């Protein structure tokens, strides 16, 4: 079963890699890896030892993002899971915007966690375009603490959440995150 989940995750990432994200590297209004690492270090603090490597990996796959979200989230699952979060979307040419997200998931997943989250945002045409559902596969392995990256997609827009959290959670799931301008308890 683990091999099937790995294959599904790699297949989704491969589909995303076939899109020409390298063109985004030289566009004005994007964030360089150095800018992202500095912002991430300020946000994550002492737990950001591997942050530069994770950001470099994301930039090598998808190019330079034209926005990012800094926030916090919490989630839990017993086969079916929920995740809720809030933060601020930062863009160079359209200003900052408060955002909230929530979403369901289903899979081989159990436990709960709280995390500080940095989401790299690629191909966002306008700040209002953040308000939609982003689907993907997620895997979590928290035992007291953890750090990880995944990718979610909606059309051409790609979100790459980088999470540093605490809790006890293990598993893999399929789900989505829905972004809204106001907090809501409805994950659907």
Image (cartoon, rainbow, N blue to C red):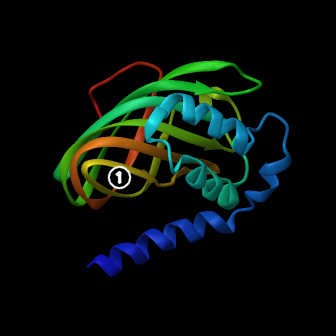
Percent position of residue 96, x then y: 63, 19
Is 2 rendered above or below residue 130?
below
The C terminus, quarter of image: top left
Residues 36 and 73: in front is 36
Residue 23 falls in image quadrant: bottom right
Residue at x 44% of width, y 52% of height: 135
Residue 140 falls in image quadrant: bottom left
The N terminus, quarter of image: bottom left
Residue 97 falls in image quadrant: top right
Residue at x 53% of width, y 52% of height: 153
Is 166 rendered above or below residue 172?
above
Provide the residue designation for mark 1.
Answer: 175
Residues 178 and 164: in front is 164
Percent position of residue 183, x then y: 36, 20
Percent position of residue 10, x then y: 49, 72
Q: How many marks?
A: 1
Percent position of residue 182, x then y: 41, 18
Is 88 rendered above or below residue 4?
above
């Amino acid at each position: 079963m683990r091999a099937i989940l790995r294959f599904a995750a790699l297949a989704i990432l491969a589909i995303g890699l076939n899109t020409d994200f390298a063109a985004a590297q030289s566009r004005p209004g994007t964030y360089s890896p150095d800018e992202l690492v500095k912002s991430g270090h300020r946000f994550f603090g002492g737990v950001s030892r591997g942050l530069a490597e994770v950001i470099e990996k994301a930039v090598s796959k998808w190019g330079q993002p034209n926005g990012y979200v800094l926030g916090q989230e919490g989630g839990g699952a017993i086969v079916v899971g929920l995740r809720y979060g809030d933060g601020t979307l930062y863009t160079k040419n359209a200003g900052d915007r408060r955002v909230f997200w929530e979403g369901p998931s289903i899979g081989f997943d159990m436990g709960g966690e709280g995390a500080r989250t940095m989401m790299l945002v690629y191909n966002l045409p306008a700040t209002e375009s953040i308000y939609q559902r982003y689907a993907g596969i997620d895997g979590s392995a928290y035992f007291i603490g953890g750090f990880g990256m995944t990718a979610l997609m909606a059309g051409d827009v790609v979100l790459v959440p980088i999470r540093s959290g605490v809790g006890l959670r293990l598993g893999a799931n399929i789900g989505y995150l829905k972004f809204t301008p106001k907090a809501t308890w409805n994950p659907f």
